[in-house]
Image (spheres, rainbow, N blue to C red):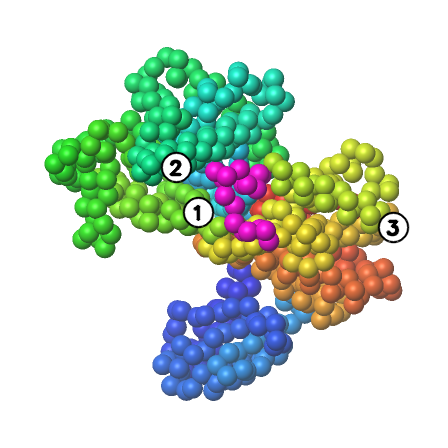
Amino acid sequence: MSLESTLRSEIQKAVSVLFNQSIDQLQIQPTNQEFEGSHTLVCFGLSKVTKKNPEETAKSIGEYLLANSTRVSKFNVVKGFLNLTLSDKVWFDVFKDIQANSSFGQLTLTGEEIMIEYSSPNTNKPLHLGHLRNNFLGYSVSEIYKACGYQVHRVQIINDRGIHICKSMAAWKLYGNGETPQSSGIKGDHLVGKYYVEFDKRFKSQVSEAVSKGVGEEEAQKQSPIMREAVEMLQKWEQGDEETLKLWKTMNGWVYDGFNATYKAMGVEFDKLYYESNTYLLGKEEVLKGLESGVFFKKEDGSVWVDLTSDGLDQKVLLRADGTSVYITQDIGTAILRFHDYPKISGQIYTVGNEQEYHFKVLFLILKKLGFKWAEHCFHLSYGMVDLPTGKMKSREGTVVDADDLMAEMIAKAKRQTLELGKTDEMSEEEATQLFEMVGLGALKFFLLKVDPKKRMLFDPNESIQLQGFTGPFIQYTHARIKAIVRKGESMNIRFDSGDFSAVQNLEPAEREVLKVLSLYENKVKEAAREYAPSIIANYAYELAKEYNQFYQNIPIFNATDPAQLAFRIALSKKVADILKKAMALLGIRVPERM
């Protein structure tokens, strides 16, 4: 039985004895750092049962536990909050259990399967800063669910068709002169992105020129030669024109090669890829079935719609008058195909920016109306935009913050900082290079994940790389520092893995605080899964590293004269390092052995 479960049971007994009442629901939470204690019972909701005010209720229960529980050594009451201080024996037992459990934080397999979608780029430009937050978020949530005992299927939908793809193709055809990634030395996705930007420049120039000659803005856009070329390409693609399909496959191939290199650098992976070009037809079929069954309706112009006004939304077009699909049509097909491919999944999590919140409300509602019960278990993991100190990103103007460039910049920053501090003096060149990548990417990932996903955020590269403060490098450095302590303990032949610390008489306050945070890890993993929030793990890792550093500064470990106390402190340090490594792994971040 966990510590919280044991406390809950003892409090329930106290209520039964004191007030002759039984109670199932108790609100127990970590004690606010301003007050002494580790666990707090919120007593406001108990007044109906106890017939006393919350403060009197808290005092009565506290006095009972102090007299009858071997676990509670002190208590204090702040209004209706009962803060409990546990005995050192309890914390030694907690540590003994944690140390004996090598899989602490990895919950038992549930037998449940879940699918998590992330990345899902367009094949007309390279990945950017927003994609970094998306990928890191989706990958981390998948790792958190794995830690909660789920079998996780990581997927993405690649938006490989549509007018935006044809824009890059048209610009390359008109102005590319046969340029390839090999001939230009440009990474494939960057090369295609170059022509997406080129399209926009040419299009604006052509429209501006036509408007200057008296042509209306809307007409000028329609008559733009480069736009007409792109529209014609889209029509030919949908008609299966051989030459157009060949160019489409070639340029998409360049992009996929580029994406794969970026994903490898990011440290993310997928179990299966879905392509819009393969799923949109299935979506069209389902829409037509829904039309026949009366779920959807057709307007006079032949377009097919769904009416969601009774659900508080509006009407949504599903097929245009010419029979072509819209974005949501493809999503309908993809969702159905995924449940066909993985019939055991209990749900799908879509990692997509918050600008698509309405889209997913509509999608899930349509799937329910089509009779798919699993639609109730689809969830949109919505996240806010990432800004830089220089302002908002704009992809079509070519001022997008490129993912490859940003990762390279962070690694370069890590290298400069690490060399200045002399952290690589005893490392080989290969070890040093690995450290630079570990710190640079760790700084980037941690900074993007430490913020609640729902919030818009500002990414500051210089702040993220600092060795002090709420950063990835601070936690990485703490881990490396602990590993040095463990190596020293091993060199001194100190037996700190025995798990028997009964000879240690009492705990210092700093040791107690570390144990308190350490014991919360499993609950934090569960909470992060429940809230779809890696930020909970990031905050936990920072709190553990911070408390350990307080312990390290206040208690010189190797000055201990008692062998049992010395062994305990090294063992405690080692377990902190283990949990920091596990927590950071849930964020997709590696931690160094030396730094």
Which of the marked residues, 1 or 2, is nearer the chain's N terminus? Answer: 2
**Which residue is located at x 69 percent, y 63 percent?**
547
Across and down, in percent, residue 115 comes to 42, 39
Relative height, residue 402 to residue 161 (above, below): below
**For the residues marked 1 and 2, what is the alpha-carbon distance in whole angstroms?**
38 Å
User: Mark 3 or mark 1: which comes first in sequence?
Assistant: 1
Q: Is residue 465 visible?
A: yes
- Position of 26 with respect to 336 (left or right) is right
Precedes in sequence: disc 3 or disc 2: 2
Q: Residue furthest front?
A: 213
- Cα distance in 3D space between marks 3 and 1: 53 Å
Q: What is the three-letter code of the residue carrying label 1?
A: Gly
Nearer mark to the viewer, of 1 and 2: 2
Q: Which mark is residue 492?
A: 3
What is the quadrant of residue 242 in the picture? top left
**In the image, is residue 307 part of the stretch drawn in magenta?**
no
Q: Position of residue 488 (x, y in %)?
A: 84, 50
Q: Quadrant of residue 94?
A: bottom right
Magenta span: predominant SS is: loop
Would you name the residue on which mark 1 appears? 353
Tag on residue 212? 2
Q: Nearer the viewer, residue 356 or 212?
A: 212
Q: Nearer the viewer, residue 503 or 373?
A: 373
Q: Which quadrant would residue 510 be assigned to in this image?
A: bottom right
Q: Nearer the viewer, residue 215 or 338?
A: 215
For the magenta stretch, what is the residue range?
Answer: 387-403
Q: Nearer the viewer, mark 3 or mark 1?
A: 1
Helix, strand or loop for disc 2: helix
